[in-house]
Image (spheres, rainbow, N blue to C red):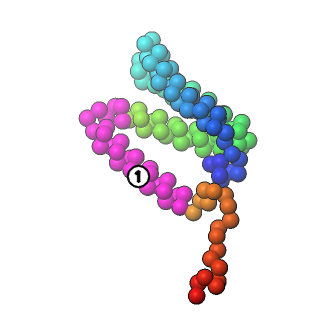
Amino acid sequence: MEILQKRPVHPVQYILVGLALVIFYTLLLSISEFLAFDIAYLISASATVLLIALYARAHFRKWSSAFLFGGILALLYGFIFVLIRLEDTALLVGSIALFLVLALVMFASRKVNWYGTQPVVPDSSEAR
């Protein structure tokens, strides 16, 4: 996202987002002591998604970025919830889904210039 939007993300910002993702589990655990697990999961996931989406909006200065981040995270937390409920087939379904997501990301990012430099064009004299 930072390469496509030409707006670098500082390592501290990565750490802050990572901490928000980790704290999700603490929220889930603490809220589920007082409410049903499904409700606790919904509250914890919604709070985490909203926090990170708004943080992305503040950094990238675009609502489309916030919606993209929020949507991806919401799908991820929804998928994790489904995996938790599957119990017996969770490993199989999770492994297949991760494989498909990796394949999709690899395919979608195949033309991204990760270093942001100009492509090297071979010298015509070297081609002979």
Find the residue positioned furthest to the right: 61
Q: Is residue 103 visible?
A: yes
- Residue 84 image point, x, y percent: 36, 31
- Residue 33 image point, x, y percent: 43, 13
- Based on the displayed image, in which of its 4 quarters is residue 91 positioned? top left
Mark 1: few, some, or many residues within 10 Å (few <14, many ≥20)? few
Q: Main secondary structure of the magenta part?
A: helix
Residue holding disc 1:
100
As for residue 85 lying within the magenta part, the answer is yes
Q: Is residue 35 visible?
A: no
State whether residue 5 is above or below residue 22: below
Quarter holding the C terminus is bottom right
What residue is at 26 percent from the left and 35 percent from the top? Answer: 88
What residue is at 36 percent from the left and 36 percent from the top? Answer: 83
- Residue 78 image point, x, y percent: 45, 36
Seen in the image, is 20 located left or right of residue 77? Answer: right
State whether residue 77 is above or below residue 62: above
Q: Secondary structure at mark 1?
A: helix
As for residue 61 lying within the magenta part, the answer is no
Say which of 126 and 105 sits in front: 126
What residue is at 53 percent from the left and 61 percent from the top? Answer: 110
Say which of 10 and 124 sits in front: 124
- Residue 82 image point, x, y percent: 38, 35
Find the residue positioned furthest to the left: 88
State whether residue 97 is above or below residue 17: below
Give, as a three-letter code, the residue at label 1.
Leu
Find the residue positioned furthest to the bottom: 128
- Based on the displayed image, in which of its 4 quarters is residue 59 positioned? top right
**Magenta stretch, residue numbers:** 83-110
Seen in the image, is 104 located left or right of residue 48? Answer: left
Seen in the image, is 125 located left or right of residue 94? Answer: right
